Image (spheres, helix red, strand yellow):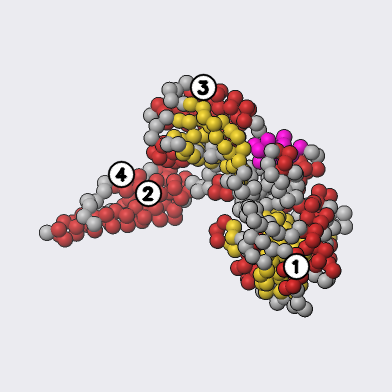
Amino acid sequence: MADELRRQELRKLPSVDALLSDAPDDLVGRHGRDLVVDALREAIEHARAGIIKGGSCPERAELLAQAAAWMERLGSPTLQPVINATGVVLHTNLGRAPLSKATLAAMVAAGKGYSNLEFDLAAGVRGSRYVHAESLLCQLTGAEAALLVNNNAGAVLLALMALCREREVIISRGQLVEIGGGFRIPDVMAQSGARLVEVGTTNRTYLRDYEEAITAETLALLRVHSSNFRVQGFAHQPTLEGLCELAHQRDLLVIDDLGSGTLVDTRTYGLPHEPMVPESVAAGADLVCFSGDKLLGGPQAGIVVGRKDLVERLRRFPLTRALRVDKTTIAGVQANLLHYLRGEVASQIPVWRMIATSREEIAQRAQRLVDELHRPGCDLVDGRSKVGGGSLPEETLPTTLLALPGEPVSLAARLRTGSPAVVARVQDGRVVLDLRTVLPEQEPMLAARIGELLDG
């Protein structure tokens, strides 16, 4: 009996052509016939599966509505703007550094038309994409040469593969780090073809450990900055200056992987000292690798600076083509670096503007939002913001949080799934918003979203 009922319902399913004839006149004009046909097939197959499970055949209007919704989802970007109210400045899951207006303008200008990406305008011949940001990087770091690739992991892999393949590279056991996504330094070294030589212990490594491990097969000493964790207490690592002195006495290279890397002194902003790229160059590191999209505050990129002869070898290495950056990234990196050259880091680069914002200013912004909302249960509470992004581990900044009334799990979910999406955090059983990471122009939208939810 049940099987017969299912067969009856299945026979009610219309054909694609029948549904197409019932579709609104403008549907094909807006989406194209092929996409409409695919959507109708999708709706019919979905209905067929439901009938087989015991359901009934939907009406034609419902099938058309399902097809229209399917096309709408397919045509909507999955990558969408988000209001970051978590207080994590460099939030990896939310795209890390928001870009400055000048950086965005430069990227748009490079992308909307043609450019001299690989063309020498003066000579009228083919040029190189790698020259465009090099002079700025050399000026800001003191290095002889520079190279851009897609990210810092690519920069480290390229340096090891191009220079150290089938040779020994010595590294402290305390620096065999793992960064996000299970990316581990030992795995990178194995992939590069370099032979890993571990020295010292997890918490203490001395210069003599490196010296005793050097053999005729050794080519480089690798220092990896533990940017996403910190070993405290009974711990020791040799200075970079000491490593460079030892390496150069033995005609070896020093490659310094700074991970995040910074061009400003973080102590200026009330944070512990983070190794600066110019410091590594001045200490004698032959190559320094760092990110363009973390503490630098620009678009995603990996940057290598150092000796001209070594950078040139990297530039000519075949893997470089697979890791190269496009014209918009180059334009963005250049524009972002100009902020450093002009001394306008805290005023123009959003990451540093957020870090530099005082708790008092954030409290004033939060109070204005409370006054505008004028809803019971909206309170201001003390809290801490995080730098994040694998930089300055566990370092926080004092802030003032806006706490919202309501069941926290469902409220946070409703904030995330609305438009615009708002990502907050839950603290002490309440949803809290940290305006440190909310862009000023986003505050009216944020107020409107909160008001809708609290009234709903």
Instruction: Find the distance from the CA under tag 1 to the CA under tag 2.
Output: 70 Å
Question: Along the polypeptide, which appears first: circle 1 or circle 4?
Answer: 4
Q: Give the residue at x 51% y 27%.
A: 380
Q: Which mark is residue 208?
A: 1
Q: What is the magenta range?
A: 344-356
Give the residue type that dot 1 points to: Arg
Across and down, in percent, residue 328 comes to: 69, 50
Query: Disc 2 designates what residue?
Result: 67
Distance between mark 4 and mark 2 Cα atoms: 10 Å
Image position of 134 (left or right of 403): right
- Check if residue 346 falls in the magenta segment: yes
Please name the residue shown 58% across and 38% down the image. 385
| The label number, if any, that marks residue 61 in the structure image | 4
Q: Taken as a whole, is the magenta stretch helix, strand or loop?
A: helix
- How far from the left and from the top, in percent, is residue 432? 49, 34
Name the mark nearer the viewer: 4 or 3. Answer: 3
Mark-to-mark CA distance, 3 and 2: 41 Å
Between discs 4 and 2, the one toward the N terminus: 4
Q: On the image, numbered disc 3 is attached to which residue? A: 372
